[in-house]
Image (spheres, rainbow, N blue to C red):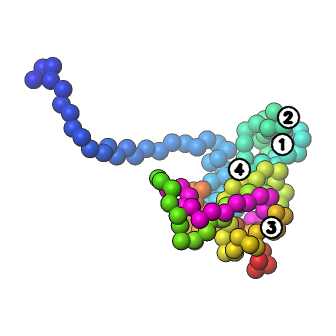
Amino acid sequence: MKGEILTTKGAVRAEFDFWVGLYLDKFLDGLEQKKFIGNKCSKCGKVYIPPRKICGDCFEHIEEYVDLPDIGVLTNFTFTKWAISERRPRQSKNIKMIGLVKLDGADSAMLLPILKTEPENLKIGMKVQVVWSEKPQGQPTDIKGFKPIGGA
Ligand SMILES: [Zn+2]
């Protein structure tokens, strides 16, 4: 037996948890309550969401958290018939829309699905509102996406 190497073939399931850090943890706590929590630089006034430790403009350490509304502006978008986040590319039955949304009062934007509209209705600058998951769990998936306001 000594010196022999046993081998086996098969998949190994590895489950693990890790802490996302103080700032993202605060953001995820907000999502669990269907709230957006960002933070504001005390030096230049820039508001980030998700919150971050250091201001990207002036390198100030950011400590002030701010609540942000669930309404914002679509600042850019794209759409595709190709499935997103799949292991291999394949065409989807539905067109998927992805948008860069800047919440009112924020200076940074989030990239999320655009829902409940058609690609031809998308316009840069249009107002959008968050669509929450029904049972938020403090996960990024608590945000299903954004929908146009006004039935566009
Ligand atoms: Zn700053």
Among all residues in the image, which is located at the extreme left?
Answer: 1
Beta carbon at label 2 within 8 Å of ligand 1: yes
- Please name the residue shown 67% across and 63% down the image: 79
- C-alpha distance separating marks 3 and 2: 32 Å
Q: Which residues are magenta?
A: 69-86
Residue under circle 1? 41
Task: Determine contact: label 4, label 1, CB under 8 Å.
Answer: no
Q: Nearer the observer, disc 2 or disc 1?
A: 2
The image quadrant of residue 123 is bottom right
- Please name the residue shown 74% across and 72% down the image: 120
Please identify the quadrant where the N terminus is shown.
top left
Q: Is residue 85 on the magenta stretch? A: yes
**Residue 53 place in picture, x, y as percent:** 73, 38
- The numbered disc on residue 50 is 4
- The numbered disc on residue 123 is 3
Which is nearer the N-term, disc 4 or disc 2? 4
- Neighbour class for label 1 at 10 Å: few (<14), some, many (≥20)? many
Q: Nearer the observer, disc 4 or disc 3?
A: 3
Q: Secondary structure at mark 1?
A: loop
- C-alpha distance separating marks 3 and 1: 30 Å
Q: Secondary structure at mark 4?
A: loop
Among all residues in the image, which is located at the extreme bottom?
Answer: 151
Q: Amino acid at mark 3?
A: Lys
Q: Amino acid at mark 4?
A: Pro
Q: Is residue 38 visible to us here?
A: no
